[in-house]
Amino acid sequence: MLLLYIRSVIFLSLAILVTSLLGCANSFVEKSLAPDPKLKEKPDVFAAKTVSEESKETKSKQSNKISSNLPVGFPQQLKYPNAILDEASSTEGPASKLLTRWHSSDPRNVISNFYLSKLRQNGWKILQQSNDETPVVIAARLNDTQVKISIEPKPVNNTQAQQAQTNQTQTNPIQTNIELLVENINGGKLTTQNNSDRDQENLPRPGSPDFIGPVANNTKTPESQESLENSNLENSSDSATKSRQNFNDIDKIPPQQQEKIQDLAKLGVLKINFDIGSEQNTSTPNSAADNSTPSNPNINKFEPAKNITRREYARWLITAYNKMYGNDPTKQIRLASASTKPVFRDVSKTDPDFGAIQGLAEAGIIPSSLSGDSTQVLFQPNSPLNREQLILWKVPLDVRQALPSANLASVKQTWGFQDSAKISSKALRAMLADFQNGDKANIRRVFGYTTLFQPKKTVTRAEAASALWYFGTEGEGVSAQDALALNSTP
């Protein structure tokens, strides 16, 4: 009995001892195998990167390589900031060319607007522009360098890119491919064009008709730089127009009209012949040239509130239209030659505006016997222009197609004028076509919102300038500001 008691005590003591040893062992093992607490304060360098992080890192690396991968001669100002270079190649020989291919996540219209803006800002002449086609094609030229840009959206085939798009809850991922071809049209070598060299690259080169030598050095004085920037304006206008590029009497009219008048003046459109129609001088070929003398009190005066005459509007109309489409001779109106038989009895061949008035009549823009109106034998060049005549002559140059059929009811229903019955039948078709131009309609832009058209009310010079500042429809047109950007190319 005693022996059994002793054995029980021994077994109990051993059990307690083993349990204590096992607890210490487990504590020691856990501590030895536990992670270093310092590692918790630092990120796991071996952790897997997310798709967005890998995409950002890839884009950063590719962006750093773009400049080094671009061929020599690539115009740096045409590098789209949010595009990744995929391929670049260049060829030397009779025709030096370089081709680059890019891709971007930006939509097509954003990219095309960027290139059009950059080309115009840097003095490129736009040769081709197709915004409504796929791919969008833009062609431009600067001196001997010509560039062709093709912009086309395509589905993404890369699996990783599709996964990235899926993570952003987007479907059918699309990327925009850009192909940019630069070539020297005269067969010479392409040179690097950095932003710092922008002024130098716009200078006329030896061999160009605009170049005046010799070139002593690369230093450009402010006077010479200003002369180069205005060279095209000076070549396209006479001395009177040049002196009136900034009128000093238009500060009382709305700022929107001031800007339009200044744009047209810089374009060489607003030539004012103060002496025409006076008894002292009615046959001077270009009496506006007399305004360049300091003794003329009308110099640098536009007189925006003055009524514009029919001859002035005809001259401004054909000049503005031809300036707007200066890069497309097929759209321009030809001035009549002195050998042409006059269509109006009161506009002879010796009239200084004969070429403009006769040219508009022969093009069918203004009513005459040539367009089938046998009653229009007099033009009355010195009579004031009225509102319906402004629309009747201007709208055909906006739409450049046959005017729609119209009657009094259709014009009254669209425009809602209370005095629609006072509008002549000739002007109804032009007014209906003008209504279809939406916010670009001449009536809205020139006269604002009105329920009275007042068709026989005379038009001021400021109103005429507002109408001539833009040609085209709501979807496609060109402004005087666009034409100035095109004409800035040396």
Image (spheres, rainbow, N blue to C red):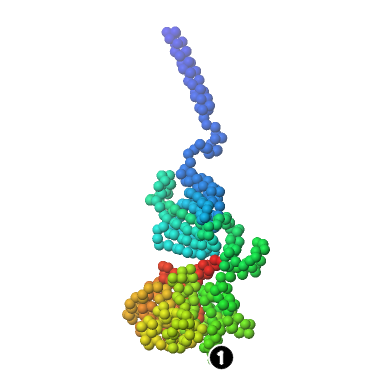
Residue 36: % across, % down: 54, 32
Q: Is residue 73 above or below residue 227?
A: above
Residue 377: % across, % down: 41, 87
Q: Amino acid at mark 1?
A: Gln
Residue 215: % across, % down: 65, 64
For numbered disc 1, what is the local secondary structure? loop
Q: How many marks?
A: 1
Residue at 65% in and 61% down: 218
Residue at 53% in and 27% down: 32
Badge 1 crowding class, 10 Å Cα cut-off, few under 14, some 14 to 19, many 20 or more, is few
Q: Residue furthest bottom?
A: 279
Is residue 61 among what the camera can see? yes
Q: Is residue 340 above or below residue 202?
A: below
In what quadrant of the picture does the C terminus appear? Answer: bottom right
In what quadrant of the picture does the N terminus appear? Answer: top left
Residue identifier under label 1: 280
* The image quarter in which residue 457 lies: bottom left
In this view, the residue in front, 241 or 97, is: 97
* The image quarter in which residue 435 lies: bottom left
Instruction: Judge from the rendering whether residue 60 lies leftward or rightward of residue 420; answer left or right.
Output: right
Residue at 52% in and 53% down: 93
Residue 478: % across, % down: 46, 69
Q: Is residue 169 above or below residue 444?
A: above
Is residue 478 among what the camera can see? no
Residue at 54% in and 74% down: 236
